[in-house]
Image (cartoon, rainbow, N blue to C red):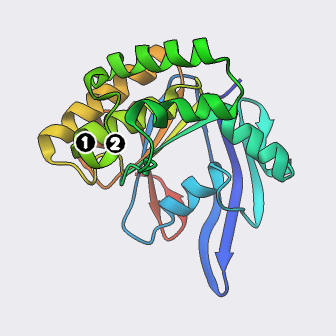
Amino acid sequence: MPALEVLQLSKHYVDAVVLRDVSFTMSVGERVALLGPSGSGKTTLLNCIGGVDKADSGRVLIDGEELTALDSDGLARLRRQRIGTVFQFFHLLPTLTAAENVELPLQLLGVPLAEREQRVRELLMRVGVQHRAHALPSELSGGEMQRVAIARAVVHRPALILADEPTGNLDSHTGEVVLDLLAEVVRESRAAMLMVTHSEEAARRCDRVLRMKDGALIVR
């Protein structure tokens, strides 16, 4: 069973077509880069796959479950259980420590405290920021914040990781470190990862590249 199936996804805003019959599949453990110029529909596609936005037509299946057929409660459940998201600007909650940010997805799923603490501790160590567990986001560097964000995205063991320009707000060296870390985490977790990026270097780290133009996938 594919980790992700996108079938003839289309969307428009007022008189502008943003997605045009987009279709592709991703295998378990596969890393796919999504490239294209600004305005080509990349972020809208990512938002529709992640359930943040709703397509006008088409289907999205994650781990065999059809996201586009779910009501709001079912959609919230699927997003909590099967999707992890890494953002360019981190989106850590400013009043929570690094450890508390990572723990939050597990709290939402009702995971027992002892298991939450163990998984958070192991992941913070895995991404190399265990010594910053009690620091607030304002006390972390950009690279540290992105490492915490990666830990938060995978702590609940999702089937699909959506990464939106995960290195776009980092210097080149830190970006390389984060790409290495993402590759290792995906390989170990066997999650599929779809990464929106403008970076050809980041794309070369992936197993496959999809390119978008004017809302459609193009063959190149």
In front: label 1 or label 2? 2
Residue toward you, 78 or 190: 78
- Disc 1 target residue: 140
Query: What residue is shown with label 2?
Result: 136
Locate the N terminus and report the quarter of the image it occupies. top right
Residue drawn at x 57%, y 19% is 116
Is 79 left, or right, of 88 in this rendering?
right
110 left or right, relative to 125: right
Q: Which mark is residue 106?
A: none
Identify the residue shown where x is 31% and y is 21%: 130
| x and y, in percent, of residue 33 in the image | 41, 43
Give coordinates of residue 50: x percent, y percent.
62, 49
Label 1, secondary structure: give it. Answer: loop
Q: Residue furthest bottom?
A: 15
Q: Amino acid at mark 2?
A: Leu
Judge left or right: residue 208 versus residue 5: left
Examine the rendering and report whether any part of residue 201 can be seen: no
Give the vertical position of 150 relative to 186 (above or below).
below
Task: Name the residue located 44 percent from the left edge and 48 percent from the top edge.
Answer: 95
Task: Identify which residue, 142 or 189, lies in the foreground.
Answer: 142
What separation in Å lies between label 1 and label 2 (alpha carbons)? 7 Å
Circle 2: is it few (<14), some (14-19), or many (20+) Cα within 10 Å? some
Could one spot residue 101 in this view of the protein? Answer: yes
50 relative position to 126: left or right: right
The correct choice, above or below, for 148 with respect to 6 in the image is: above
Residue 161 in percent (x, y) is at 52, 36
Residues at marks 1 and 2 touching, judged by CB atoms closer than 8 Å: yes
Identify the element where label 2 is drawn: loop
Which kind of residue does numbered mark 1 sit on? Answer: Leu
